[in-house]
Image: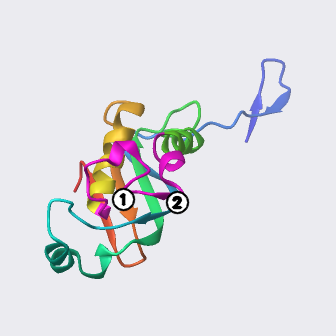
Amino acid sequence: MVDQNRSGATAAAEPKAMSSPLTVLVSRRESFIAAHQLRDPGLSDDENRRLFGKCVNMHGHNYVLDVVVAGEIDDATGYVWDLKRLSDVICRQIIQDVDHRNLNTDVPWLKGRIPTAENLALTFWERLRPELPEGMLRSVRVSETDKNWAEVGDHV
């Protein structure tokens, strides 16, 4: 695209970001490795084994964390929100505390919660929401395996 200035000379037009009044969803994926044991300390070993099966034993996962934010595209940047900034928030609020850790004993803000995928997703949501602009956080999904995941969000 070429613009003409007042003198008739031509110059390349400045590229413009596309804007839209529609809500756009963007996502950031992070991963971490952690061990956990599904066990309620208030129950007997037999009851825990009945409830949690083989997951009552200490084991680990290569977790995948997907965080979705939403908003309108900013005219100046073309972003809904800078995904590098989102990554920084996720890493500061979650990943640095859980990566290569025992989720039952090493993470103070998980104390008292059985570290199921459901409880992790809820707790991660609670840690991320105050760090993001109001109403921007849409969902937090924690995948333990490619077959098992839990998701918390305002659309769920």
Q: Quadrant of residue 51?
A: bottom left
Q: Residue at x 33, y 30 (%)?
A: 134
Report helix, strand or loop for mark 1.
strand
Task: Pick the residue in front: 61 or 70.
Answer: 61
Query: Does the magenta-highlighted stretch encompass residue 106?
Result: yes
Residue closest to the far top: 6
Coordinates of residue 25 in the picture (x, y in percent):
41, 50
Q: Residue at x 37, y 79 (%)?
A: 147
Tally of numbered discs: 2
Residue with the mark numbered 2: 32
* Image side of residue 76 versus residue 56, left or right: right
Range drawn in magenta = 93-117
Sequence-first tag of 2 and 1: 2
Residue with the mark numbered 1: 141
Task: Pick the residue in front: 141 or 24.
Answer: 141
Report helix, strand or loop for mark 2.
strand
* Image side of residue 138 versus residue 92, left or right: left
Q: Residue at x 21, y 78 (%)?
A: 49
